[in-house]
Image (cartoon, rainbow, N blue to C red):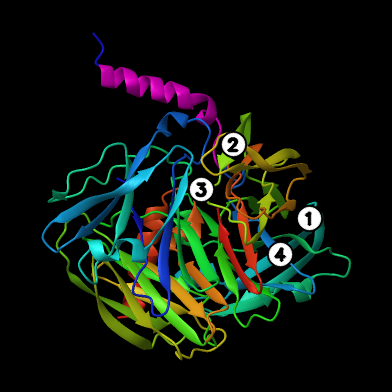
Amino acid sequence: MIFFPLLYNVPAMVGHTTLHNFPPNNWEKNLVRPKQINVSWTDGKRWNTKNIGSLDPYESKKISYYDIKNLLPLDTLPLLSLTDKAPNTIVNSINFENNLGTTWPMWRATLGLENNNSITSYQGELIPFPSSGSMLSLAPFFQKDAEISYLIFVNIETKPESREGLIEIFSSKTKEKILSKKIKTNNISIIDITGVSIDNDDMLVFKSTDLSSIPLIFSSSNNYTNLSLEHTHPPAALSILGNRFMVQKDIKKKWFQLLS
Amino acid sequence: MVPITKLNNFLRRAKRAPWILGQRLVRAPSNIDSSVSDLFIWISDDDWKTFFELIGICGLFEDKPSNMILYLYDKNGNTLGIHSFELDTHKKTTIDISKLLPSNSGDFGTFSIFHMSSPRSITQYESFIAERGYTGYQYKSSTLLSFIHGNHDAIAYNRKSKKTELLGSTSLFKRDFNLQYLLEPEHKYYIGIVNNSSSHKDIKIRVLKNKTQSEVLHYNEISLKPKGVYFFLVQLKSGQKGRVVINSKLIMARPIIIRIKGNNMDVFHG
């Protein structure tokens, strides 16, 4: 299944995900049929899935974290999905195949955070990372003068067991470590970086040799009227065509040495 | 007997073929000594400013200063100016695009950034250095920028001939891009579409009522020049909710969406 995470635990913000029952293209209309909405989570031993409703053809529906909060244990990442049939309730592993079929572009949902009348969102989906993964990513768009700033790391792996991994954050210019924190797999981790000060020509670099993750930066004004949410790229995005994953391997090797 | 699953897979592939065969999302640059960039969108008027966070990509690999050139285009793809930048190793700079625009540039247009050298780590794998960086938009008096990353590998710069070439392909048939996003009535939406192909493109936009296939709430059509950009303004009436369908011969008419409610502005890719 393709999963659509529901962001949670971001202070003062409510996560929401809007699911859509139509493909992004016009040649896979056969995929449009009534769908079941499910929420999955891991209890640390097994993946659990619960049916929470349905979606008509060509319908979009917004699910708030408050809609499903009481169905899950505390501090658990909710993963929404769309299926033709209601799934089994408890499984040891999850089938992460692309059940929605489309690839160019991928079937996406709208993932966002809101506070009263202010909303920020992005279009996304979540595919599990290999447990042998690592991470290197640059964030040139960190807004050091923002009154509120959080790093949001999102990770899921196929195995239901949660494990810890170290995330380190460096200055690209000085290579000095700004902070480090252990985060858990199969969850969202929030790191408060409000007040972290770097030079105008400097960037944050995120490094982990323990796990892969999607890093997001959330910024806000004190009164939450101005919001910003954006994810960083993996280094493979620095080039196109050819063997981009060897390019990524090279730059990871170099920067892991620079930051060791 | 052919197993039913094999037959289904064959039928599915056959159905997709007219939309995929020979219609690559992005063509490879014609010269190996090329640099690739998105066609980013700038917006500049009394309410808007545009910034770009520029990284020296080459310097990330080879510990030496990086040189880049920035091409500015108006909304019809005409060149407005070319600017050069040099960046020290492992540093970034914030470009205030609005300050680089000549007078009478209009309110919006596109821009590209080309890196003037490629590290061996990229060329040895027959890959091309690509600028997909972050554009920040400032709306009214907001103290924060709203960022989006580059989305299309739209245009290449041949370092030998010093010429650019558009990399977007043209679809055999007109196709729909169904934006998987729900438009709501309290917001004003600007839906920006860029033509990354080398020919004019007719673009039709429909906003269909939620849960329906054909109930049209809004319709507009334009012709878009190469490297050009257009913003469709959509504002639904009270009680209406809808989805956007973009019909064109662009392979991937994925728009950027700007959502405004009062002073709250959000920008994201479709």
- Distance Cα–Cα, label 1 vs label 2: 23 Å
Instruction: Report the chain holding disc 1.
Output: B
Q: Tell me which numbered mark, 1 or 4, is placed earlier along the sequence.
A: 4
Q: Which residues are magenta?
A: B4-25
In this rendering, position of residue A207 left or right of residue B121: left
Mark 3: secondary structure = loop
Mark 4: secondary structure = strand
- Distance Cα–Cα, label 2 vs label 4: 25 Å
Q: Tell me which numbered mark, 1 or 3, is placed earlier along the sequence.
A: 1
The residue indicated by pointer 3 is: B180
Question: Are discs 1 and 4 located on one and the same chain?
Answer: yes
Is mark 1 in CB contact (under 8 Å) with mark 4?
no
Res B203 quadrant in image: top right
Binning the other alpha carbons within 10 Å of mark 1 as few (below 14), some (14 to 19) or many (20 upward) gives many
Is mark 1 in CB contact (under 8 Å) with mark 2?
no
Residue A54 screen position, x and y as percent: 35, 44
